[in-house]
C-alpha cells in the first residue's frame, strides 16, 4: 500500500495540492544542496543510529514507467507505508510516467506522479525524485515515441479527459513538480574507493560531454539548464552508449566512485558497465532494485550481484 492512498486522484484540487507539496519538499528538504539531494557520510560507529533513523540503507530503482505493482513493492521495501512511522531506507524514484497501462487508449500516469509527489512530501529527507527525460519531455511538450506510442500526447489526452477545464492547472502543477526535481542523489563516501555514490537517471552522452558543466551539481537549476542538447540538466538525463573511458572521466569530474543509473534497456533488470556504473530497470517483468549499504563503500560490480527482483 502507498502512504498516499488517501489522495483523490480524480479531483483536481487534491492532485494539484500533492504536486505542489512535493515541489516544495524537493526544494526545501534538509538534504537539498544545489541541484542534488546529498546525504552521508556514515562512519562505522554511526551505523546503529543511522539504521534506526532510516539512513543506513538506500533502495535504488531504475525506470518505473507507471508500474503500480513494482511501485508498491519499492515503497514497502523502504518502509514508507505509514506516514507517521520513520522510514527504513532512502528511496530513489525516477521515470515514473509513460507506462503501458493505458485506459481507453489514454495514459493516466499523472496519478503515479501525484503519488510520488505526495510520498516526497510525507518523507522529504528520504524520498529522492530524480529528474528523468520522460518527465522533462512531458513538461517541454517534446515528442517521445516509446514502442510506437506517442506518450506525451497520450498523457496530455488523459489529463484533459479527466480534468477538462482544470487541465491547465494540472499542467502547471506538474511543471512545478518536475522543475523542482534534483538531478541526482549524492551519497558522500559510499562509492567505490570511498568516493561518492551518485544515483542519476543517466549521464551526458559521449558526443555531448564537452557541453556538460559538472558545476551544475552544486547550484540551483536555471531555465538554461533545461535547454535540449545544450543545458546541463537536459544533457544529464538523455545519455546512452557510454564507454569505459567516458565513465572514468565522468567519475573524476563528478567525484563519483560509483554511478547507479536508469534510462538504458537492461533486459535482465541490471547491466554492469565497467568500471563504475550499474544500469537498473524496475518497470518490466525482470525488473530489479538494489539495496545499498550507505555505511560502506560500494563498487558497481558488487551491487550488480546484490540486485533483487521485483517480480
Image: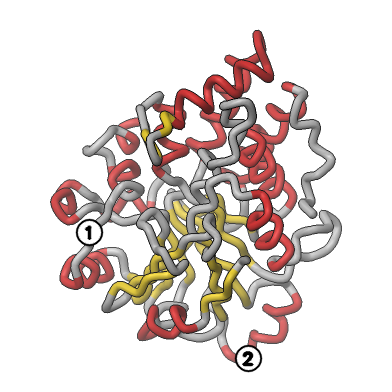
Quarter of the image with the C terminus in it: bottom right
148 or 33, nearer to the observer: 148
Question: Which residue position is annotated with label 2?
Answer: 45
Q: Where in the figure is residue 191, as x and y percent of width and height?
A: 41, 78
User: Which percent across, then down, holds residue 251?
Assistant: 28, 69
Identify the residue at horizontal 74%, vertical 50% (top origin): 122
Who's the residue at 86% across and 57% down the image? 84
- Residue displayed at 52% across by 65% down: 286
- The answer to which of 19 and 134 lies nearer the viewer is 134
Q: Residues within 10 Å of mark 1 (few under 14, many from 20)?
A: few
Quarter of the image holding residue 114? top right
User: Residue placed at 40% from the left, 39% from the top?
Assistant: 146
Which image quadrant for residue 197? bottom left
Q: Which mark is residue 241?
A: 1
Q: Nearer the viewer, residue 241 or 39?
A: 241
Residue 6, given in percent of the width and then of the height, sits at: 84, 40
**Sooner in the amino-acid sequence: mark 1 or mark 2:** 2
The answer to whether residue 81 is above or below residue 173 is below
Q: From the image, state whether disc 1 or disc 2 is nearer to you.
A: 1
| In this view, 150 is above or below 93 | above
Q: Quadrant of residue 302?
A: bottom left
SS at mark 2?
helix
Up the image or down, 196 lies above or below 49; here it is above
Q: Secondary structure at mark 1?
A: loop
Amino acid at each position: 500500500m502507498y502512504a498516499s492512498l488517501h489522495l483523490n486522484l480524480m479531483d483536481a484540487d487534491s492532485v494539484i495540492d500533492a504536486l505542489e507539496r512535493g515541489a516544495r519538499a524537493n526544494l526545501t528538504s534538509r538534504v537539498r544542496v544545489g541541484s542534488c539531494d546529498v546525504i552521508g557520510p556514515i562512519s562505522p560507529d554511526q551505523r546503529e543510529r543511522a539504521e534506526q533513523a532510516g539512513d543506513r540503507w538506500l533502495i535504488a530503482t531504475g525506470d518505473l514507467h507507471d508500474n503500480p505493482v513494482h511501485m508498491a513493492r519499492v515503497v514497502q521495501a523502504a518502509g514508507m507505508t505509514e506516514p507517521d512511522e520513520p522510514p527504513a531506507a532512502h528511496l530513489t524514484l525516477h521515470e515514473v510516467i509513460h507506462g503501458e497501462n493505458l485506459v481507453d487508449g489514454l495514459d493516466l500516469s499523472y496519478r503515479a506522479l501525484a503519488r510520488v509527489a505526495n510520498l516526497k512530501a510525507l518523507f522529504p529527507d528520504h524520498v529522492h525524485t530524480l529528474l528523468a527525460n520522460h518527465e522533462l519531455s512531458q513538461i517541454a511538450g517534446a515528442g517521445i515515441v516509446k514502442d510506437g506510442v506517442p506518450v506525451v500526447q497520450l498523457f496530455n489526452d488523459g489529463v484533459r479527459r479527466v480534468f477538462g477545464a482544470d487541465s491547465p492547472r494540472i499542467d502547471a502543477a506538474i511543471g512545478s513538480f518536475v522543475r523542482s526535481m534534483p538531478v541526482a542523489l549524492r551519497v558522500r563516501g559510499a562509492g567505490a574507493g570511498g568516493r561518492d555514490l551518485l544515483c542519476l537517471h543517466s549521464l551526458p552522452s559521449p558526443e555531448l560531454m564537452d557541453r556538460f558543466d559538472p558545476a551544475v551539481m552544486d547550484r540551483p537549476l536555471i531555465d538554461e539548464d533545461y535547454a535540449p542538447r545544450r543545458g546541463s540538466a537536459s544533457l544529464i538525463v538523455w545519455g546512452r552508449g557510454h564507454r569505459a573511458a567516458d565513465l572514468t572521466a565522468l567519475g573524476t569530474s563528478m567525484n563519483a566512485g560509483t554511478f547507479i543509473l536508469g534510462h538504458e534497456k537492461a533486459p535482465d533488470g541490471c547491466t554492469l558497465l565497467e568500471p563504475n556504473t550499474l544500469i537498473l530497470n524496475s518497470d518490466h517483468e525482470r525488473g530489479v532494485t538494489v539495496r545499498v549499504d550507505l555505511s560502506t563503500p560500494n563498487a558497481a560490480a558488487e551491487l550488480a550481484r546484490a540486485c533483487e527482483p521485483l517480480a
